[in-house]
Image (tube, coloured by chain):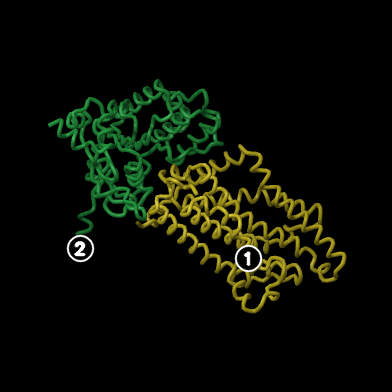
Chain colours: A yellow, B green
């Protein structure tokens, strides 16, 4: 079957309907809202105090003020962006609603676009209070990064969507037995993306792997900005190029996994 | 085949509007080692109500899921309202709908919110009016602003039916539509389905274990066993062939392998 034929004529109306569906859900459940705020706030407080302590005891970190807390905020954009995407998808599996959606005129690309928009909404609810906490508690103003912050954000959110699309495809194909991948895959990327340390710390052979990941460029770029006051556009463009490849590849993988799910008949069951 | 040949073999708009509501041609579905559907063919005219009968594992749900495009056939061909499924499903999904015990509606959303979301997905015009109409028809008004998860099984079934009817479907696929309803409500839902079919010339394919329901609603019955079609005719003709007075007795004959004996007795 040609899944691509299902993607012509994207309807903003249907995408809006799906966003409305997730908005209703979010507003009906205070634990879901609290969860969005809780972990980012906890992260920024823990790492913020750690940074204060190090800054008082080490000249280098005093000079490179903000790299730790900046890394925490950017990491959370990456991680929460993927979770925001994947959890909205999982809500359909948990609710056994996927069959209703797949049987409706909603196209796969519209479904994915609505999940992307929801990841932005969920991210805003969780991360904006986190950045305000960082500002008031530790005097770190992430917005002072200016235009580079937009480049960092876009590259991180694109990666989070690629991972979210691929992981959702795996859950679609394999049922809720694959749910744990949603929560853990990003942590496998974390050490290679060099969130808290420069790429040069890694063994040379592992550096090649690290440079294949767009977030590595973002975290290196953030350190260059905070430590050397230099915005590395070359790093951002490299990250963007890899992100384009990853987005196309993840979308292709999602369609292949959807087709496989149709073959297996797992769209109706969606269970374990 | 040249491009011209291909173009001439494609169905035209007139072909599609006069085609059968559902055309299943030599459909086979194999899951690993299991042959869930084994070379079945049937065609349902528009405006008909057909009952799909069979014991557990007979292949009813797989057949319906393949018609809906949720399952890819291993071989064979399925057409819905003149369009091939699932290749051309985008052209037809907005004109059909379904209800199945294998899917639920989101539990935390209220009935009104659920119907709003699905109505928008199906681009229903005057959605608020349509929801009010369905709430009235299916007696949902008392709990329309209650979360779906807090409804009784019977209320959930009526909400699922409202979702299935929200887009005025030309084709309705129903899997056990009156399960968990009390006899009075179930009878009332059957009446509603009959009226809906007559008013809209809709086609209904109904999988059910309730033989009285099938006798009352259906002008044709397809009996499946182990993935194959065991019989296919009007309910009266099938009962006469098996020398039985109810479909339930026929069902038991087929399920227990007394088919030949019953047919012989009838002769």
* Number of numbered discs on residues: 2
Residue at the disc numbered 1: A215
Q: Is residue B87 visible?
A: no
- Which of these two is toward me, A152 or B226? B226
Left/right placement of residue A86 relative to residue A47 reads left
Q: Quadrant of residue A101?
A: top left
Query: Any mark on residue B125, and which?
Result: none
Inter-mark Cα distance, 2 to 1: 50 Å
Residue at screen point 52% across, 38% down: B106
Residue A153: x, y in percent?
Answer: 64, 60
Q: Are marks 2 and 1 on the same chain?
A: no
Residue B183: x, y in percent?
Answer: 39, 22
Residue A41: x, y in percent?
Answer: 73, 51
Where the N terminus of chain B falls, by quadrant?
bottom left
Q: Is residue A200 above or below residue B189?
A: below
- Chain designation of label 1: A
Callout 1 environment at 10 Å: few (<14), some (14 to 19), or many (20+)?
A: many
Left/right placement of residue A166 relative to residue A152 reads left
- Chain designation of label 2: B
Q: Is residue A159 above or below residue A83?
A: below
Query: Any mark on residue B1, and which?
Result: 2
Residue A190: x, y in percent?
Answer: 65, 64
Residue projecting furthest to the bottom: A204
Q: Quadrant of residue B163?
A: top left
Where the C terminus of chain B falls, by quadrant?
top left
Callout 1 secondary element: helix
Q: Is residue B45 above or below residue B247?
A: below
């Amino acid at each position: 079957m040609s899944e691509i034929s299902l993607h012509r004529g994207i309807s903003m109306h249907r995408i809006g309907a799906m966003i409305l569906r997730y908005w209703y859900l979010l507003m009906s459940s205070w634990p879901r809202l609290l969860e969005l705020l809780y972990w980012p706030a906890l992260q920024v407080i823990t790492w913020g105090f750690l940074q204060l302590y190090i800054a008082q005891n080490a000249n280098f970190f005093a000079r490179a003020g903000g790299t730790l807390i900046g890394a925490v905020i950017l990491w959370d954009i990456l991680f929460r962006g993927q979770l925001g995407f994947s959890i909205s998808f999982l809500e359909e599996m948990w609710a056994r609603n996927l069959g209703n959606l797949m049987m409706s005129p909603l196209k796969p690309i519209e479904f994915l676009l609505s999940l992307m928009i929801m990841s932005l909404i969920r991210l805003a609810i969780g991360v904006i209070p986190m950045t305000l906490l960082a500002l008031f508690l530790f005097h770190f103003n992430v917005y002072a990064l200016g235009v580079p912050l937009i480049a960092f954000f876009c590259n991180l959110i694109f990666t989070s969507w690629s991972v979210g699309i691929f992981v959702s495809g795996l859950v679609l194909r394999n049922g809720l037995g694959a749910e744990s991948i949603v929560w853990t895959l990003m942590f496998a990327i974390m050490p290679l993306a060099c969130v808290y340390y420069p790429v040069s710390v890694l063994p040379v052979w592992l550096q090649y792997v690290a440079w294949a990941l767009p977030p590595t460029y973002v975290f290196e770029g953030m350190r260059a900005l905070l430590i050397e006051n230099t915005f590395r556009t070359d790093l951002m463009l490299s990250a963007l190029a890899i992100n384009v490849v990853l987005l196309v590849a993840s979308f292709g993988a999602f369609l292949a996994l959807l087709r496989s799910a149709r073959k297996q008949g797992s769209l109706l069951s969606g269970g374990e | 085949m040249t491009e011209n040949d291909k173009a001439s073999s494609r169905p035209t708009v007139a072909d599609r509007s006069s085609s059968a509501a559902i055309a299943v041609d030599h459909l086979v579905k194999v899951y690993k080692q299991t042959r869930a559907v084994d070379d079945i063919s049937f065609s349902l005219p528009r405006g008909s109500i057909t009952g799909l009968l069979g014991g557990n594992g007979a292949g009813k749900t797989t057949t319906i899921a393949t018609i809906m495009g949720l399952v890819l056939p291993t071989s064979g061909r399925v057409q819905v309202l003149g369009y091939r499924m699932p290749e051309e499903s985008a052209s037809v999904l907005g004109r059909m709908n379904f209800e199945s015990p294998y899917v639920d509606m989101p539990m935390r959303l209220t009935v009104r919110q659920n119907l709003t979301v699905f109505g928008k997905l199906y681009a229903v015009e005057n959605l608020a009016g349509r929801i009010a109409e369905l709430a009235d028809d299916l007696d949902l008004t008392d709990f329309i602003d209650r979360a779906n998860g807090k409804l009784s099984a019977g209320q959930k079934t009526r909400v699922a039916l409202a979702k299935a009817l929200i887009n005025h479907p030309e084709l309705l696929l129903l899997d056990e539509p009156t399960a968990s309803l009390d006899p009075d409500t179930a009878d009332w839902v059957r009446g509603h389905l009959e009226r809906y079919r007559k008013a809209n010339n809709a086609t209904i394919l109904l999988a059910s274990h309730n033989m009285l329901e099938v006798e009352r609603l259906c002008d044709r019955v397809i009996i499946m066993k182990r993935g194959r079609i065991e019989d296919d005719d009007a309910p009266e003709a099938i009962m006469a062939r098996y020398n039985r007075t109810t479909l339930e007795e026929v069902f038991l004959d087929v399920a227990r392998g007394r088919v030949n004996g019953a047919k012989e007795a009838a002769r």
